[in-house]
Image: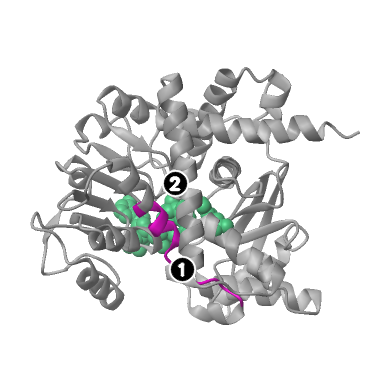
């Protein structure tokens, strides 16, 4: 049996389509390794539900824009669907499907009882006023309302969305339900039932994974970080706090470099004030692409998919790549990095800290209780390191890369859930 995918000519291959091809390629390799039959492989390659909606948004000047929105539930065999919502102009159904599939393997890998989902709206949030953004968010949520719910599908932040977006989602859902439903979404503000530690959880997980993979004192270890948003900025901060020297950082506005180490807190303050790393006077400006070629110990891609390709992979000198972003490395680049002896801690492991603390937030919401930051941090560390140990052990035992091992574990757990549940009817 084969997968039905929309046909594309090379000219129409979007970054989203490339991301989905990568995700399907990774699944194929894991399925072959596990000897999954064709039918099960096809089920795992196919999202359970995909919804595309048109979202009208009234602009401040009275005009009307209509943008596309998506919610994809890739798999729900191990529990409710879980995954972030992205606001980005280039997002499309293929990208959201790939991101949803990665959520499925990620949740299975770290052992939390969720399937995988993702949402997206093809819009540039920086081009909207706060009121426009609120209207857009509420209308999008209204369109996907039948799909989401604390027992069905629980959104969270991703690129271009934040705590405020989650608060609007929680409110829109709650108004429709007729009572407050904090567990419908995670990554909320504390005042609405958010969890301590969720804001920095993905970055904390990146730090935990990076330090575990380094296997030596972080003192003086050099780091370059691509992307200085919610994940990248705090990953840089936590790695610097641990003793690493963050020598380069980039965002969409530019890239900055200082071989003596960047004062990450000062750079964050500059970005909060100016809107981007460009113009930060305490470090030198550098070309975006040069960041990938620096002679550093650790490279953290924390922006979008397809950042490391066959074009720049041969010039990457970092000994360790820790994927804060989802899907930053293409399969071709992955093979080049492996051949060059670069260790890659894959996305579904390295950035799992966010969904782990989302899970803890959801459990607190369902039980109407709240845990201390110490309790959250302990559980986050435990789940991250358990998964890290399982991945490194399997990779060593079977001669796999960490990515292959992570996918074999994630896919096998989901396949097992399918086998145990059987097929209805
Ligand atoms: N938020 C979360 O909890 C989780 C996020 N992730 C993944 O982490 C990645 C980042 O997400 P998040 O931090 O939330 O998103 P944000 O929107 O907060 O930040 C994205 C960052 O990437 C930068 N960026 C975009 N394109 C480029 C580029 N070409 N070069 C350099 N920088 C670029 C943006 O710059 P600018 O601000 O200037 O536009 C911004 O600094 C995504 O892949 C996401 O899926 C994974 C797990 C959980
Ligand atoms: O916190 C969550 O539920 C999901 C985070 C996310 O979207 C991701 O891990 O890519």
Determine if residue 61 is in view.
no
Residue 374, numbered label: 1
Q: Quadrant of residue 43?
A: top right
Tag 2 secondary structure: helix
Q: Is residue 183 above or below residue 24?
A: below
The Cα–Cα distance between marks 2 and 1, rounded to whole angstroms, is 16 Å
Residue occupying the point 40% across, 27% down: 401
Name the residue carrying label 2. 385
138 versus 75 height, above or below:
below
Q: Is residue 12 left or right of residue 155?
A: left
Say whether residue 321 is left or right of residue 281: right
Residue drawn 70% across the image and 50% down it: 51
* Magenta residues, start to end: 193-207
Where is residue 52 drawn, in percent x and y?
67, 52
In the image, residue 311 above or below residue 198: above
Q: Quadrant of residue 343?
A: top left
Left or right: residue 75 versus residue 382 is right
Please give left or right for residue 215 compared with residue 323 in the image: left
Q: Nearer the viewer, residue 370 or 202?
A: 370
């Amino acid at each position: 049996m084969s997968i039905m995918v929309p046909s594309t000519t090379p000219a129409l291959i979007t970054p989203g389509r490339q991301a989905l091809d990568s995700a399907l390629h990774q699944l194929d390799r894991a399925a072959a390794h596990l000897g999954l039959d064709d039918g099960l492989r096809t089920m795992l390659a196919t999202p359970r539900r995909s919804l595309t909606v048109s979202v009208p948004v009234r602009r401040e000047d009275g005009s009307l824009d209509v943008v596309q929105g998506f919610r994809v539930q890739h798999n729900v065999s191990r529990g409710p669907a879980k995954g972030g919502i992205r606001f980005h102009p280039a997002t499309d159904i293929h990208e959201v499907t790939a991101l949803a599939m990665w959520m499925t393997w990620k949740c299975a890998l770290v052992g939390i009882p969720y399937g995988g989902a993702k949402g997206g709206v093809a819009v540039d949030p920086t081009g909207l006023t706060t009121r426009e953004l609120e209207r857009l968010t509420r209308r999008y949520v209204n369109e996907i309302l039948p799909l989401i719910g604390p027992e069905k599908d629980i959104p969270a932040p991703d690129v271009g969305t934040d705590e405020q977006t989650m608060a609007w989602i929680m409110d829109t859902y709650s108004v429709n339900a007729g009572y407050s439903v904090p567990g419908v979404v995670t990554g909320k503000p504390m005042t609405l039932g958010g969890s301590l530690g969720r804001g920095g959880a993905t970055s904390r997980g990146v730090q935990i994974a990076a330090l575990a993979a380094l296997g030596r004192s972080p003192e003086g270890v050099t780091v370059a970080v691509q992307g200085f948003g919610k994940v990248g900025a705090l990953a840089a901060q936590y790695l610097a706090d641990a003793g690493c020297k963050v020598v380069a950082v980039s965002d969409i506005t530019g890239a900055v470099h200082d071989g003596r180490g960047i004062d990450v807190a000062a750079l964050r303050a500059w970005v909060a004030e100016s809107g981007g790393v460009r113009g930060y006077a305490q470090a030198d400006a550098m070309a975006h692409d040069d960041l990938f070629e620096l002679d550093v110990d650790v490279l953290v891609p924390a922006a979008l998919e397809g950042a490391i390709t066959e074009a720049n992979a041969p010039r990457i000198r970092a000994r360790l790549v820790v994927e804060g972003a989802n899907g930053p490395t293409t399969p071709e680049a992955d093979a080049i990095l492996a051949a060059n002896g670069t260790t890659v801690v894959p996305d579904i492991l390295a950035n799992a800290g966010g969904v782990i603390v989302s899970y803890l937030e959801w459990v607190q919401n369902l039980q109407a209780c709240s845990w201390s930051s110490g309790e959250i941090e302990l559980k986050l560390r435990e789940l991250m390191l358990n998964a890290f140990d399982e991945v490194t052990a399997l990779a060593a035992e079977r001669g796999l890369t960490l990515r292959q091992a992570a996918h074999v574990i994630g896919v096998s757990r989901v396949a097992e859930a399918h086998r145990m549940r059987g097929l209805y009817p």
